[in-house]
Amino acid sequence: MKILVVLCEGSHDVAFLYRLFETIDFKKDSVKIGEMPKPFNEYIANMLKKHNYDDLKLSYIWPPLPSLIMKKAGNKPANQADVLLMLYALGGDSQDEKAKKIINDYSAWFLGKKSEEDASYFTGEHTYAFAYILDANDHGIPERVKKIEGIFSRVLGKRSNDRIDHNKVIKWSDASVGCFIFSGDKKCGRLEDIVYPLMEKDNEPIFMDALKYFKTHHRKEDKCDEKKSTIGIAGQLQCPGESNTIIIRESRYLSGGKICADLKCGEIINFFKKLISL
């Protein structure tokens, strides 16, 4: 089995990747913790048991659990392994400590390091991969790559040869590692620069009216993102009362046909195919 841990900036990223993975035959896995494949069931159960809930604030979700788990059955005649995909929403681009903890915990299991848990290690029958997904924002792609490389280096050790880069997959401490930076055409930007045009396509009148509504009623003192707000307004027609996360994950504004025809989506999907196959 190939086990892929994907660290995402937020829940919108997880929702969008869910739509992409659906187009390459991944299925959502909603099993109970006790029914997950070993040793994931033991690892997550032990992590929950050991946490000190007396120190936990209601608004602070910890320990981190996958936001979404997906699976894809391998092609046995082609000698392709099953793939288990675990997507995490970190809660922002400043959650370096969360990211390091997740990478450290899994690498302890994946790579045979000493583990604090009492369950058995993963066996050699599995191969492992980490992916880190961030928005470029105004920082640009090189700065985001530098940030991600620093996080991996502090957990997995520094590399002297092949370096991590945007849309690139390398071997690092016997695991496959890669990163992808969401951006617009000018190498800055964010997820919405990819999602918005896809959702707007074939729905231009709806999104034009939603944008007009936003501009009419938006007050300058309110810090609102135009694209996120417009998606939220238009999304109420198909997912009433729901957040942008649900709108991205479930609305008909995104379709498999649009995703498969889009060059940027194809680039993201091919990145994950490389990560799975290495």
Image (cartoon, helix red, strand yellow):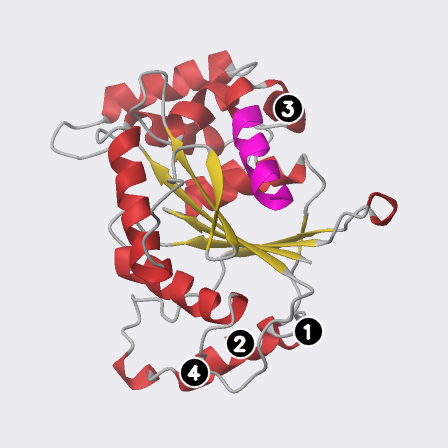
- Which residue is the extreme one toward the left? 221
- Residue 198: percent from left, percent from top: 51, 21
Q: Is residue 81 visible?
A: yes
Compared to 179, does 120 lie above or below? below
Tag 2: residue type? Answer: Tyr
Could you give the CA–CA distance between mark 4 and mark 2, rounded to whole angstroms?
Answer: 10 Å
- Which is more toward the observer, 33 or 264? 264
Which range of residues does the magenta coloring cover? 265-278
Q: Secondary structure at mark 3?
A: helix
* Main secondary structure of the magenta stretch: helix
- Residue 218: percent from left, percent from top: 22, 27
Q: Residue at x 28, y 55 (%)?
A: 95
Q: Earlier in the sequence, mark 1 or mark 2?
A: 1
Could you give the CA–CA distance between mark 3 and mark 4, rounded to whole angstroms?
Answer: 43 Å
Q: Which residue is mark 2?
A: 43
Number of the front mark, 4 or 2 = 4
> Within 10 Å of the Cα at label 3, are there few (<14), some (14-19), or many (20+) other Cα atoms?
some
Could you give the CA–CA distance between mark 3 and mark 2, rounded to whole angstroms?
Answer: 36 Å
| Quadrant position of the N terminus in the picture | bottom right
Could you give the CA–CA distance between mark 1 and mark 4, rounded to whole angstroms?
Answer: 22 Å
Given contact means CB atoms under 8 Å apart, are the residues at marks 1 and 4 in contact?
no
Q: Earlier in the sequence, mark 3 or mark 4?
A: 4
